[in-house]
Image (cartoon, helix red, strand yellow):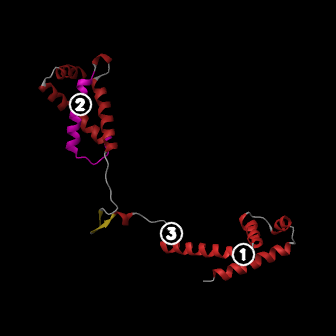
Amino acid sequence: MEYLLKDLILDCKEGSKTAKEEVLERLRPLIMASIKKYYYGSEPYEDLLQDGYMKTLAEIERFDEVRGVPFLGFIKQQLRYFYMDKGRKSTIEISLNNLILEGDGTTEFIDMIPDDGPAIEDLLMKEETDYALGQALESLTEKQRRVLMLHYGHGMSFVKIAGKLDVHYQTVIKTRDVAFRRIKVHLSF
C-alpha cells in the first residue's frame, strides 16, 4: 500500500484533486481510528473527521519523502498528536447546577457530590467553643497559663514543671486545679 500511496502523494503535491480524494478515502479508517484512540472531548464526530481530512491534506504538502520516513508512519504520528492536542484544548464546561438524569427525575450536579466535611452546625459550635475557651484562658493568671502550657502544650510532667518554676510539686497540682475551676466557670454556657 505504501508504494501506491507514494505515487498518490506525488500526484497530490502536484495538485491532482482526484488523487487527494483517493488518499483521503484510503486514510479514512486511520483517521477514524485516531479519533477513537486519541481524542477525548465533546466535539461532534463529523467535525473531527473533517478536521482530520484537513490535517491530512496539510501534512501531505509538508511531507518530505527524501527523509526516508514512510508516509503512513508519518501521517499516523501527525494525526495522533493532532487529536491528542485537540482533546487537551477541548474544554467541557460543567456547572454545579447542571441537571443529571437520575432514575425517573433529574438532580443537580452539586447534589451528587458527597460532602465529607463537618456539618455547618458543628463548625459553628466549634468556633463558639474555641472563642469561649480563649476567653477562659485569658482570665487565668500568668502562672496558671504557664503551668497548663508546659504540661498540656509541651508534655512536661508536673515534677519537671515544679523544678523549672522552682516550686513544690503540690503547688503545681493546686495551680492546675484552680485554673481548671476558672475555665469551667467560663465555659458553662
Pointer 2 residue: 56
Mark 1 vs 2, N-terminal side = 2
Under circle 3, the secondary element is: loop
For the C terminus, which image quadrant?
bottom right
Q: Position of residue 55 (x, y in %)?
A: 24, 33
**Relative depth, front residue between 41 and 124:** 124
| Residue at the image position 32 percent from the left and 31 percent from the top | 77
Whether residue 42 appears in magenta in the rendering, the answer is: yes
Q: Is residue 187 visible?
A: yes
Q: Say the numbered circle drawn on residue 118.
A: 3
Q: Is residue 28 visible?
A: no
In this view, the mark in front (1 or 2): 1
Q: Magenta stretch?
A: 37-63
Under circle 1, the secondary element is: loop
In this view, the mark in front (3 or 2): 3
* Residue 54, image quadrant: top left
